[in-house]
Image: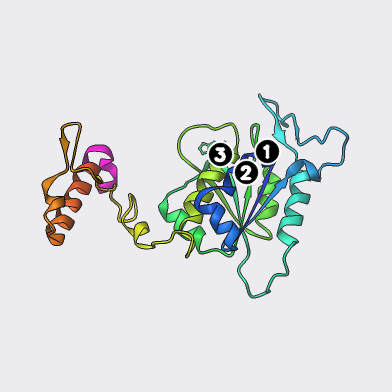
Amino acid sequence: MRIDIVTIFPEFFSVLDVSLLGKARTSGLLRLGVHDLRDYTHDRHRTVDDTPYGGGAGMVMRPEPWGEALDDVLASEQRDPAAPLPVVVFPSPAGEVFAQTTARELAGEEHLVFACGRYEGIDQRVVDHTATRARVREISLGDYVLNGGEVAAMAMIEAIGRLVPGVVGNPESLTEESHENGLLEYPSYTKPAEWRGLTVPPILLSGNHGAIAQWRHGQQVERTRRVRPELLD
Ligand code: 6GU
């Protein structure tokens, strides 16, 4: 899978060099390109924003650098005319809410582009124009506001990247997690069997795999009902 990121803060994405996704990059499973939006400006101050038409607080990102950056990123690949169009994600608190289902959909794509806006957002024409040459998704992490799309893009890239076949060594560890079966995860324990007076539930030491699976499922249902009852509807 190829992932391109356009941002005014390319240094945010240096953490993608470490851990599992870093390994996936080194091994070639994940091809990551980070592009500085200011490289596509032509004025001495490398301006990317301006005041909003119609008035209001804050600044809006101007369309010209975005147009040129996306021209570059969407063209920098000899594309098979039969291949599906790339997906361009605009992280935005005004988008559809990201979930494990979204991560799974995007993990099946060949080419993702994350267009990270700052300030009050990107001129809407960038989104509309991009939709003429790519599949566009405006995606939010949830109902709160971040200063820009970078941290949101990072979270999405981690959730998506770990679902790309081969990135996580043991694929079974992906199916046992929170949200993969619509329930929250069961509690986990390891050695020692007693720690600071606290013991491990005896069923886990019984060797009875059927009973253990049943207990874990019961824990998942109980925890989901307590913490996230809306997931059970
Ligand atoms: Cl994707 N962007 C910003 N700026 N804030 C957010 C968000 C995204 N998701 C939740 N809050």
Separation of residues labelled 2 and 1 (CA atoms): 10 Å
Residue type at tag 3: Val
Q: Nearer the viewer, residue 40 or 24?
A: 24
Task: Name which residue lies at 65% across and 56% down.
Answer: 131
Q: Is residue 30 visible?
A: no
Mark 2 or mark 1, whichever is nearer to me: 2
Nearest to N terminus: mark 2 or mark 1: 1
Q: Which mark is residue 151?
A: 3
Tell me the residue at 35%/57% (across/down).
173
SS of the residue under disc 3: helix
**Which numbered tag is attached to residue 9?**
1
At numbered mark 2, what does the secondary structure look like: helix, strand or loop? helix
Q: Is mark 3 within 8 Å of ligand 1?
A: yes
Q: Is residue 183 in the magenta section?
A: no
Using the image, determine if residue 3 lies above or below residue 197: below
Q: Is residue 134 above or below residue 179?
A: below
Kindly identify the amino acid type of the residue bearing the numbered disc 2.
Ser
Which comes sooner in the sequence, label 1 or label 3?
1
**Quadrant assignment, res 207:** bottom left
The residue range painted magenta reads: 225-233
Q: CA distance from mark 1 to mark 3?
A: 11 Å
Q: Which residue position is annotated with label 2?
A: 14
Horizontal and vertical percent for residue 120?
64, 32
Q: The disc labelled 1 sits on which kind of residue?
A: Phe
**Residue shown at 56% from the left, 45% from the top:** 153
